[in-house]
Amino acid sequence: MIRNLLSLPPVMVAVCWSLWLGLLPSLAQAAISIAESPDDLNPSPRVELLEDPERRYSIESLLEGCQALSWQDSEQEALNFSFSGSAWWVRFELVNDTSGPVRRLLELAMPMHDYLDAWVVNDGGAVVQSWQTGDRRGFDSRPVAHRTFVFPLYLAPGEAYSVLLRLDTHDGLFDATPLYLMEDERFLAKSQRELMAFSLYFGALLALMIYNLLLFLATRERILLHYVVYLGSFFLLMFLSRGFAFQYWWPNWPTFNNQLVPVNIGLFAVALAIFSDSYLNLPRHSPRLSSVVRWVAFLSIVSTLPALWGNYGPLFLLIIPSAILLSMSLLVLAAWRSWRGDILARLYLVAWSVLLVGITLYLLRVAGVLPYNLITEYAIQVGSSIEFLLLALGLAWKINRLKNDKIAAERATLEMQRLANQRLEEQVMARTLALEEANRQLVDMARTDPLTGLLNRRQFGECLDEELRRSGRSGQPLLFAVMDIDAFKTYNDTYGHQAGDEVLVRVAALLHTHFRRSGDRLFRLGGEEFGLLFEADSLEAGYEALERFRASLEALGITHRGAAHGVITASFGLVTCEDQSQIVDAQSLYFQADQAMYEAKAQSRNRIVTRHLASAREGLAE
């Protein structure tokens, strides 16, 4: 560049450099004198701006040519390009009109600039200092290790210098940036004041977090944990946005630092929604509004997810409406609960309103609506400090109220216990009756054969006596049969007792299939012997029903090598009685059926022998 400039005729060089140094008033601002003021200088209103929408300019192209470019006077108290897809150039002149060399520090007092390049050009057109830094580059790219961007400028006596800055973004969001030009001592004093203020601020947040966390561990009140999470997300958000996290925690991870800022905004929205929901007790007072708040918070965090893929600036176009919607929702809810007389809601309304004012001022400053000043820059810190103190006061009041509610609940519990004691005898009596009923059920279970599920021998006597009495009253014939599985001992000896038990279970299941009428009773009388008390209109009908069962049993085809028929069969003794006076009791009826069954055994088994009263006649199976 310098070679190209020197190759021009001397007259052209002089004209071009005159244009560059601002000798033509229409093209440049007047140079800033280092000795102009002993206080900090703010060059922002006196700089010139050049928009580079296509990013076609470089420092060489700006220094090589002398063509007139569309530089515009800034006249801003702080550089503020807000949302812009262009790169921006900043230019101003410095003159050291003192008799000695001077060092000055130029600070861009905003830590969140993606790409920031700076050059110092002497009056001969040579670049004497240059830097390439930004928060998307490693922290070690900064000439001064500070959370903001600080450039040391060395000015020789009687020399004039041009300072050029190029600001560019990864995705179109510029934050408002004040400029300061100051001596080392002034910068050190300013940094110490800021560090002291931020230390007190962050220390207060940490103290509140630790205190409420200890309270949560002591009381197990979930709202305290929600408050700690809310404080923690806000603490991290402020620590990130003020540049401390990048400086102290992850100076070599610029991409992660930029991704975490919008994501943490979404996390803060979720933490705020959960805390507010718990603080205002919305699930009890208004479950629908509680769901609305949670959904708005969910939309807020979803809108921040594209930051994980590097899209940062456009997210604020989504985050700001979501934040406004969430803020308005919380304000309306707090106002509604306040109107209903909720003291906690009134404290919350005041606290949230203070923070909301601070957030609004900051967002309007980011959007370029409001100018940069101490109020708009630190409004969030001031508002949040007041808010957190008011919320802590509200939590203390809430815990005290919970304590009083607990005492009232204990008194109510004692009263309930007193009333419960009056009903204790009734309950004991009811439990006794229930226990007796359970005992009766156990007795019934004791009367059932555990293997087959049929009624056992004890139940047989009771049921048969009952049926004898009923049959005597109704005049209906009574049919009773005894069944014994043929050669069952041989089967057990041959196939084992487990196989024998399986046969008994299958026989019982087949009995249930054939005798399902309401008056039918099935018994396991012992071993392989079964009793059947069933309903039928006559001996012939009973015989036919029993014959069908006998045939079905044989058709099962359960192999029995020791039996005459090669399969499991049974012998039956069937007794019918129309005149119950001839049957003294159940044992007498059983004796008749058992004798008939033994006759069937004697007649080569697998058959039915019937008896009518004391007479017997044989019915052969088909």
Image (cartoon, helix red, strand yellow):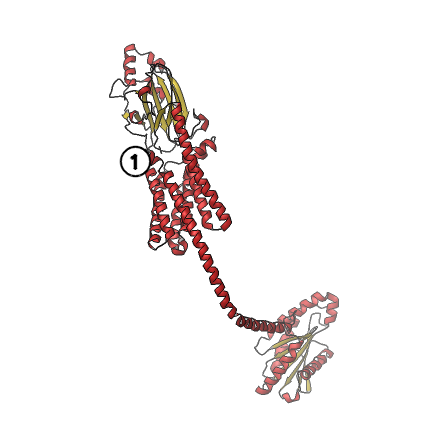
The N terminus sits in image quarter: top left
Viewer-proximal residue, 62 or 105?
105
Where is mark 1, residue-wise?
370
Question: Can you tell which quarter of the image residue 202 is in?
Answer: top left
Viewer-proximal residue, 424 or 3?
424
Outermost residue toward the top in this view? 10
* Residue 253 position within the rendered picture, expressed as x and y whole percent measured from the top left: 47, 32
* Residue 361 position within the rendered picture, expressed as x and y whole percent measured from the top left: 32, 39
Q: Is residue 140 left or right of residue 46?
A: right
Q: Is residue 300 above or below residue 576?
A: above
Q: Is residue 344 above or below residue 145?
A: below
Q: Is residue 518 above or below residue 344?
A: below
Viewer-proximal residue, 472 or 359?
359
Disc 1 marks a residue whose amino acid type is Leu
* Residue 334 position within the rendered picture, expressed as x and y whole percent measured from the top left: 35, 50
Residue located 52% across and 68% down the image: 421
Residue located 41% across and 53% down the image: 281
* Residue 140 position within the rendered picture, expressed as x and y whole percent measured from the top left: 46, 26
Viewer-proximal residue, 611 or 532?
532
Label 1 CA crowd tier, 10 Å (few <14, some 14–19, many 20+): some
Counting the numbered discs, the total is 1
Q: Secondary structure at mark 1?
A: loop
Question: Can you tell which quarter of the image residue 108 is in?
Answer: top left
Q: Is residue 308 visible?
A: no
Residue located 38% across and 47% down the image: 296
Q: Is residue 63 left or right of residue 143?
A: left
